[in-house]
Image (cartoon, rainbow, N blue to C red):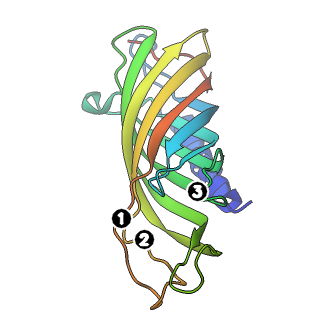
Amino acid sequence: MRLRRYLRLAFAILFVCAAYSALAQVVPAATQSRSTFAAGVGLSDYNSDWEQGRLLGGTLWLGYTPARMPWFLHGVGLDIEARDLNYGRSSASPDLREDTAMGGPIYSWHHYRKFQPYAKFLFGYGNRDAEYVNTKIVPNIFERYNDNRNILAWGGGVDYQVSRSIWVRGDYEYQRWPDMVFKNAIPVGIPIAPIHPNGFTIGALYHFGSPHLH
């Protein structure tokens, strides 16, 4: 799978974070919050911003929240996600597919007990496969193209605790894919406007480690 190398990188980052936490000095129990790791999966429904078509697919989340942070950074963590949107395509784009692998900071508010609203800002890599009708050559003939680039995303949502370790997540994300290009356009390489896929993901995460103390 094309995202395999990015998932390996994500796990490597989490491993380094875990090693750092293990070597960190222990603070008094009354004030300590243990570092937490989270892993989860979700189902995504996105507007592809391409022929107004929608795409469905799966999402993988990995998260890390460090314990030893300055007070003004409490709630800040690392969010890593990979998404494969490959289902529910419209007839206008019968072979459309979007894959992304991104990571970045996430901030969660820990003041509402079982509810934890959050905001995130991510950057990473996006890949798009599609077919389109090139009317400049032969009308109604589909042509394939592939494009990939660095992308940005921002959004937020809410996590709800259903048990000591399991949380349900509702997530919204807005992406920016800059300067999309038809590589086989005529003439070759005509840039078109950025696109902004966006949508919702519903899923669940398992938290490894005790919940934070407040």
Badge number at residue 180: 2
Amino acid beneath label 3? Glu
Amino acid beneath label 2? Met
Image point (57%, 17%), residue name: 210
| Above/below status of 214 relative to 43 | above
| Above/below status of 172 relative to 128 | above
> Marks 1 and 3, Cα distance to the nearest angstrom?
15 Å
Within the image, what quadrant is residue 147 found in? Answer: bottom right
Amino acid beneath label 1? Pro
Residue 142 image point, x, y percent: 64, 72
For the residues labelled 1 and 2, say whether their Cβ atoms are less than 8 Å apart.
yes
Specify whether 135 is left or right of 123.
right
Can residue 129 be spotted in the picture?
Answer: yes
Q: Secondary structure at mark 2?
A: loop
> Marks 3 and 2, Cα distance to the nearest angstrom?
13 Å
Specify whether 47 is left or right of 162.
left
Q: Residues within 10 Å of mark 3 (few under 14, many from 20)?
A: many
Residue placed under numbered mark 3 in the picture: 98
Q: Secondary structure at mark 3?
A: strand
The mark that comes first in sequence, 1 or 2, is: 2
Residue 144 image point, x, y percent: 64, 74
Residue placed under numbered mark 1 in the picture: 194
Image point (36%, 10%), residue name: 112
Instruction: Decide which of 147, 40 is in the foreground and name it.
Output: 147
The mark that comes first in sequence, 3 or 2, is: 3
Image point (33%, 13%), residue name: 111
| Above/below status of 158 relative to 183 | above
